[in-house]
Amino acid sequence: MFSCQLFSSQNILPEEKFSVSQNYIYLAKFEFYKKNYRKANGLFKKAFYYHSPKDSYDLLDAGAAALYSGENELFEKYIIESITKYKAPLEFIINYKKFEKYKNDSFFTELPAKYDVLYNSFFTTHQNLQVYLDSNLLMEKDQMIRDIISDLEKNTEETNLNKKFIYNQLIKIDEKNAQDLIDLTKKHGYQENTWLLLWHHRLQFNDENNFFWQFFKPYINKEIEQGKLHKSFFAMFEDFSEMESKQTQKYGMFPQSYMINPIKDIKNVDWLRNEVGLPPLLYDKIVNGYPIIDDKYQLSESDLQNLLEKRISKYEIIKANDN
């Protein structure tokens, strides 16, 4: 009795459940790469047992594993969910590389006619549609401000004095928009569709006096603790700040910049990535096709397999006891 109680998923904290789910997904995608489709399919099922999918990419990959394993109903369920919960675009689904040899199957040929109804169900079933629409308006305003600033910088006919005046007005609007997002978040919680607005404030990420990040850093950390966001949330922001200040990266979140901004501590990068719930760097090369431009990085495929399996080993016992 004590043993079963000790190894129960009920005893796992929400933050850990999200990490466990992602670790199963990392291994599932690695097994899919190795063409172990049934194993990948089973791992995706376990991942979603611990936490709901993080995004449409995880659902599409899970759908591919189910399809390749002959579980057509599960495949369709995953794909439909990618639309109704994450608004996965039709063309993106149809042209998804892993579905290429199945493009002429009835599900894909009939999907265009059904897509609008599925897409619209995202809105009709949304828990708080008004909040979603309000946050989208903030995003549109944020993008519009940045587009105007970009056009202003390119405009050679405008005088510097006029540019300065317009720029100052836009900054005030931007600050008001940022405050509106804070107010909306305080009232309704973090809205995932506003991530880009946070990203647009990345230059101030390490400014301890910045009102925007004074609010969002502790708020996001609390969301992570509650299992609503993954603990890798700030990894891109940290790497961007590292690139700006030191021309290096901590986690390797910007592989396209490795030549200019190399990973600072390549020998310990996998340990650092593990601390925030990211897979080893080699995983990004094998599964996502990202380059690794550093001879000091040493990890084999078998090492990667062992590391990914080690991350989920104790949870295999927990899952067995829950059953």
Image: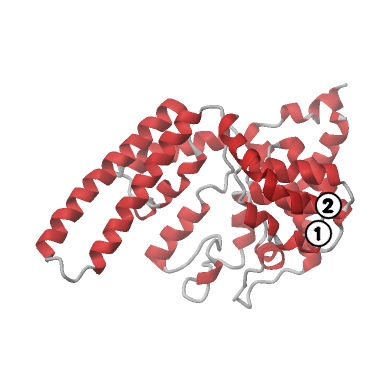
* Category of crowding for the residue at label 2, using alpha-carbon neighbours closer than 10 angstroms: few (below 14), some (14–19), many (at least 20): many
Provide the residue designation for mark 2: 67
Label placed on residue 165: none
- Relative vertical location of residue 11 with respect to residue 86 in this rendering, above or below: above
Left-right relation of 199 to 176? right
Residue contact at pointers 1 and 2, CB within 8 angstroms = yes
Please name whichever residue, 25 or 262, is drawn nearer the observer in this view of the structure.
Answer: 25
Q: Nearer the viewer, residue 219 or 109?
A: 109
Q: Inspect the image, locate mark 1, and give the three-letter code of the amino acid beneath it.
A: Tyr
Whether 2 is drawn above or below 168: the answer is above
Residue at image location 44% in from the left, 49% down from the top: 196
| Horizontal side of residue 304 vs 1, given as left or right | left
Q: Nearer the viewer, mark 1 or mark 2?
A: 1
Mark 1 Cα shell of 10 Å, populated few (<14), some (14-19), many (≥20):
some
Residue 145 can be seen, yes or no: yes
- Figure quadrant of the N terminus: top right
Q: Which mark is residue 102?
A: 1
Residue at 17 percent across and 54 percent down: it is 166
* x, y percent for residue 321: 87, 31
Colour pattern: secondary structure
Between the C-alphas of marks 1 and 2, the distance is 9 Å
Mark 2 lies on a secondary structure that is: helix
